Image (cartoon, rainbow, N blue to C red):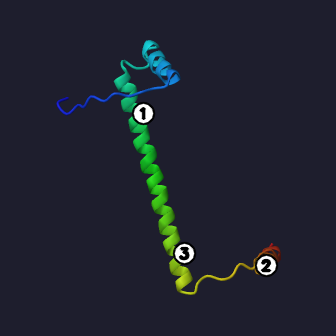
Amino acid sequence: MNNIQHLTVMLTPENAEAVHSAISGGDYASSDEIISEALGDWQLKRKSRQQKLDALRTSLALGDADREAGRVYDFDPERIIRKGVGKLAALARSE
């Protein structure tokens, strides 16, 4: 507890009432507990958001590498349809 810092937090009346209600309802012993839990949730959300952003950046880098290596083709819906029809026909023949 030697490293505790005192901070002042301004809340809207609705948020202040929610804090007081949670304490008076016995869900929490103090506003400190509520803020600590909220900060923990916030940190998890930020970490998750950063992981998703990192994964997106990795996917973009892989896509750029594929493009630079010539492994990317122009979008051709007719080619995709033909390929799908061919796969369906092969599936029907195997049944």
Label 2: few (<14), some (14–19) or many (≥20) C-alpha neighbours in 10 Å? few
CA–CA distance in space, label 1 to label 2: 56 Å
* Location of residue 51 in the rendering, given as x and y in whole percent from the top left corner: 45, 56
Q: Which one is nearer the viewer's eye here, 10 or 83? A: 10
* First in residue order: circle 3 vs circle 2: 3
Mark 3 and mark 1 in contact? Answer it, CB < 8 Å. no
Q: Position of 43 compared to 61: left or right?
A: left
* Location of residue 17 in the rendering, given as x and y in whole percent from the top left corner: 49, 18
Identify residue for label 3.
63
Identify residue for label 1.
38
Residue 34 vs 47, above or below: the answer is above
**On the image, which quarter does residue 67 sit in?**
bottom right
Q: Residue at x 42, y 33 (%)?
A: 38
**Residue pushed farthest top?**
24
Label 3: few (<14), some (14–19) or many (≥20) C-alpha neighbours in 10 Å? some
Identified by mark 1, the residue type is Ala
Identify residue for label 2.
90
